[in-house]
Image: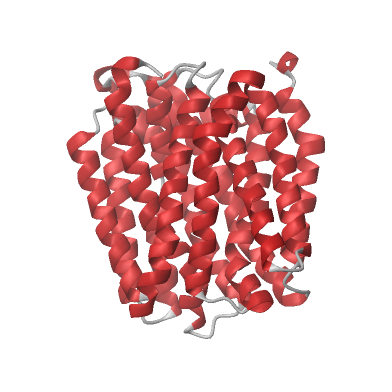
């Protein structure tokens, strides 16, 4: 890391942590909230996908706006949108309002890609993957505490976690406004024609390797992973009779493993083997985790398998993000990372829908088995192109 930026690194770490704390409060509870209005598994999948659909549409635009007008300003606007979405979720009394709440949060949901752009601004190529891993640790910490808190607060009604998440979002916004310094030279950026949003530039980025391969990989990984998020609560409800509290604790376990992986295991693997080998290790771990969960005969085996899933995910995401910034100039960080996150959002649109349909049409293990096959495909066909240095 660049020593002069240690305060900035801590600030962006705290922003992502608090932001994901609010997000984690809500995510495991969405299926139970929707079930109050007799939503089917497919409808629940659509509700989960709504956020990602509008994040997919807005991601590259928000990223490019941050390139041109500054990370700090766009990050604050994005956070305020999340607050509005949580408040509406808390007062919603019908399925249409639930969908509207997720739509609002999705349109302004560029928080993570903008935070990644800040991290890219503050690090160089040698330290970037570790920097993204630091953000991943903040993500995991928020995701660990959020679901557990959400499960506890849900005892007082499903509106309580939503309002609490809105309060957490306000804290995030205030933290950003007070402590995050702008990392973009605004005088230069506003005059630079390259920072204007352009469909032609977007097409160029999407067709340039390794970005094109990374986008495909990130889409498929998100597709497979989000299927679990969409139906996991229903899966353990059917298999073990679990409710919101137990699901919250399970997601907390996922967060703990993710934190350890981001802060300890990822830096070790990067130092010894580099980014591309670390990426090649990550996807088979995801395949193994999902495969074992689908076949787990008891809670103990399932919990053991659930350590492989966050471990693989924690290794994959930071390395993909770091590789994506290797061959682009700083004035394209926001848009490029926005595109990458949009690919993830696109996967999260279809992942829950497909998983919900598989769950309804076949059985509770089908979504996990299909995800396992997707991970195997990525490991065999996509990763070799990304990890082959001679490609670029």
Residue 58's place in the image compared with 244, above or below, is above
Q: Residue at x 72, y 72 (%)?
A: 364
Residue 175's place in the image compared with 47, above or below, is above
Q: Residue at x 58, y 33 (%)?
A: 265
* Colour treatment of the image: secondary structure
The answer to whether 203 appears left or right of 5 in the picture is right
Residue 378's place in the image compared with 23, above or below, is above
Where is residue 157? Give x, y as percent.
Answer: 35, 79
The answer to whether 139 appears left or right of 380 in the picture is left
Q: Residue at x 28, y 56 (%)?
A: 168
In this view of the protein, which residue sits in the foreground, 109 or 31? 31
Where is residue 23? Give x, y as percent.
Answer: 41, 56
Which quadrant would the C terminus be assigned to in this image?
top right
Where is residue 234? Give x, y as percent.
Answer: 61, 73
The answer to whether 165 appears left or right of 61 in the picture is left
Q: Quadrant of residue 367?
A: bottom right
Q: Quadrant of residue 290?
A: bottom right
Where is residue 43? Give x, y as percent.
Answer: 57, 74
In this view of the protein, which residue sits in the foreground, 155 or 297? 297
Residue 163's place in the image compared with 206, above or below, is below
For residue 170, say whether it is visible: yes
For residue 200, say whether it is visible: no
Which quadrant would the N terminus be assigned to in this image?
top left
- Residue placed furthest toward the front: 300
The answer to whether 211 appears left or right of 77 in the picture is right
Q: Residue at x 43, y 25 (%)?
A: 120
């Amino acid at each position: 890391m660049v020593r002069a930026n240690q305060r900035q690194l801590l600030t962006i770490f705290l922003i992502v942590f608090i932001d994901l704390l609010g997000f984690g409060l809500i995510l495991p509870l969405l299926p139970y909230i929707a079930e109050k209005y007799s939503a089917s598994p497919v409808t629940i999948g659509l509700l989960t996908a709504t956020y990602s659909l509008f994040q997919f549409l807005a991601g590259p635009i928000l990223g490019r706006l941050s390139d041109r007008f500054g990370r700090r300003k766009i990050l604050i606007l994005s956070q305020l949108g999340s607050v509005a979405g949580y408040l509406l979720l808390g007062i919603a009394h019908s399925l249409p309002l639930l969908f509207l709440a997720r739509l609002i949060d999705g349109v302004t949901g560029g928080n993570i890609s903008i935070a990644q752009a800040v991290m890219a601004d503050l690090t160089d190529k040698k330290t970037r993957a570790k920097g993204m891993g630091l953000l991943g640790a903040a993500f995991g910490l928020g995701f660990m505490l959020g679901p557990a808190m959400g499960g506890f607060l849900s005892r007082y009604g499903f509106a309580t976690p939503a309002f609490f998440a809105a309060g957490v979002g306000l804290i995030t916004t205030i933290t950003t406004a007070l402590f995050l310094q702008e990392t973009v030279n605004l005088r230069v950026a506003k005059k630079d024609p390259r920072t204007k949003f352009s469909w032609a530039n977007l097409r160029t980025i999407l067709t340039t390797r390794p970005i094109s391969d990374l986008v495909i990989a990130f889409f498929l990984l998100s597709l497979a992973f989000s299927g679990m998020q969409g139906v996991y609560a229903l899966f353990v409800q059917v298999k073990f009779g679990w409710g919101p509290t137990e699901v919250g604790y399970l997601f907390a376990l996922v967060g703990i493993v993710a934190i350890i992986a981001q802060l300890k295991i990822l830096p070790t693997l990067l130092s010894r083997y580099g980014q591309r080998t670390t990426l090649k290790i990550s996807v088979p771990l995801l395949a193994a985790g999902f495969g074992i969960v689908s076949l787990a005969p008891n809670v103990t085996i399932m919990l053991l398998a659930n350590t492989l899933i966050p471990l693989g995910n924690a290794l994959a995401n930071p390395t993909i993000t770091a590789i994506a910034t290797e061959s682009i100039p700083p004035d394209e960080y926001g848009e490029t990372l926005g595109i990458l996150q949009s690919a993830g959002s696109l996967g999260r649109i279809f992942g829950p829908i497909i998983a919900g349909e598989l769950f309804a049409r076949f059985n509770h293990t089908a979504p996990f088995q299909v995800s396992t096959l997707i991970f195997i495909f990525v490991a065999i066909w996509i990763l070799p192109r990304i990890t082959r240095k001679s490609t670029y």
